[in-house]
Amino acid sequence: MADFLTEEWFVGLNDTLREAGPVPLSKDAKVFRVVLEFSDAPVSLPHAMTLTLTSDQASLSAGDHLAADALVRLSYADAVALTTGKLDSATALREGHLKVRGDVHAIVPLLDWLQQAHPRAEH
């Protein structure tokens, strides 16, 4: 598996997202974007990524998006822990590891779905 936030990691995760189950959005939803921001990431890696969801598909890209519906700030270490399954999004939110601007009730199921869809998640 590729290292977190590398180009290969994004490619692998997007391949997995194409194969994942249904996106947890209503069929009438247009586009929902969540920016995950980790300002303490190593300088050689992106400091943000954008999860773009429609009722049909999901994709993840490096960088932020100005039209994001929500912003989630977390440390790089917490992002790695979420990605590897060592930390779940509900616990991270409850314990203050995530700082959310936007609809937190819409974000938690999306983060859970993303965490379960990731190929490195430990179930």
Image (tube, rainbow, N blue to C red):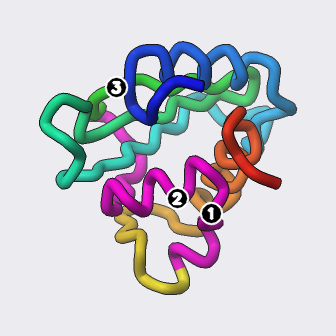
Mark 1 in CB contact with mark 3 (< 8 angstroms): no
Q: Point out the image quarter for the N terminus.
A: top right
Q: Nearer the viewer, residue 3 or 24?
A: 3
Of callouts 2 and 3, the N-terminal one: 3
Going by the numbered disc 2, the residue's amino acid type is Ala
Viewer-nearest of discs 1 and 3 = 1
In the figure, 117 relative to 104: above or below?
above
Distance between the alpha carbons at the discs numbered 1 and 2: 5 Å
Distance between the alpha carbons at the discs numbered 2 and 3: 18 Å
Going by the numbered disc 3, the residue's amino acid type is Ala
- The quarter holding residue 24 reads top right
- Where disc 2 sits, the SS reads helix
Q: Residues within 10 Å of mark 1 (few under 14, many from 20)?
A: few
Going by the numbered disc 1, the residue's amino acid type is Lys
Q: Residues within 10 Å of mark 3 (few under 14, many from 20)?
A: some
Q: Which residue is mark 1?
A: 86
Q: Residue 123, percent across and down? A: 82, 54
Distance between the alpha carbons at the discs numbered 1 and 3: 22 Å
Mark 1 in CB contact with mark 2 (< 8 angstroms): yes
Of callouts 1 and 3, the N-terminal one: 3
Mark 2 in CB contact with mark 3 (< 8 angstroms): no
Q: Which residue is mark 2?
A: 81
| Left or right of residue 52, residue 53 in this image | right
Task: Tell me which segment is drawn in magenta.
Answer: 67-93
Q: Which residue is mark 3?
A: 62
- The quarter holding residue 47 reads top left
The residue lying at 81 percent from left, 19 percent from top is 19
- Where disc 1 sits, the SS reads loop
